[in-house]
């Protein structure tokens, strides 16, 4: 059975989790339309350079130096963004 001390610790942890999530959401909402466009462009660039499968590149000749792709990934991470493969639906 949980003691009063255990319950208080759980409350504190849940409050900290709630505050962290609220801060993350506020940060995400603070991204401007211009920044959202840049994020989308960086995601498209990183997605184009992903291995196939799961992502089919737009062009088989797509190439960017690893340093550029890594820089794009770091910039996305700074905004709390990531790149998920967009697998086309089967026709």
Image (cartoon, rainbow, N blue to C red):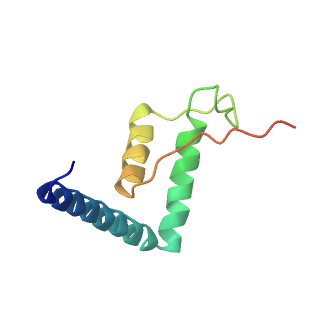
Relative height, residue 90 to residue 74 (above, below): above
- Left-right relation of 23 to 72: left
Along the line of sight, which residue is nearer the eye, 32 or 71? 32
State the image coordinates of residue 38 (x, y, percent, origin top left). 51, 61
State the image coordinates of residue 78 (x, y, percent, origin top left). 35, 55
Along the line of sight, which residue is nearer the eye, 59 or 4? 4
Along the line of sight, which residue is nearer the eye, 60 or 5? 5
Q: Residue furthest front?
A: 1
Relative height, residue 56 to residue 6 (above, below): above
State the image coordinates of residue 20 (x, y, percent, origin top left). 30, 63
Question: On the image, which quarter does residue 26 sit in?
Answer: bottom left
- Left-right relation of 22 to 83: left
Q: How many marks?
A: 0
- Left-right relation of 5 to 57: left
Q: Residue at x 70, y 34 (%)?
A: 59
Relative height, residue 25 to residue 45 (above, below): below
Q: Residue at x 64, y 25 (%)?
A: 53
Relative height, residue 83 to residue 10 (above, below): above
Q: Residue at x 38, y 52 (%)?
A: 75
């Amino acid at each position: 059975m949980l003691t009063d001390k255990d319950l208080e610790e759980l409350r504190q942890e849940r409050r900290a989790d709630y505050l962290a999530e609220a801060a993350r959401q506020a940060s995400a909402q603070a991204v401007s339309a211009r920044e959202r466009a840049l994020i989308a462009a960086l995601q498209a660039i990183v997605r184009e350079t992903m291995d196939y499968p799961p992502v089919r590149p737009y062009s088989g000749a797509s190439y960017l130096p690893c340093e550029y792709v890594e820089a794009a990934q770091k910039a996305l991470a700074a905004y709390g963004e990531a790149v998920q493969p967009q697998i086309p639906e089967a026709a």
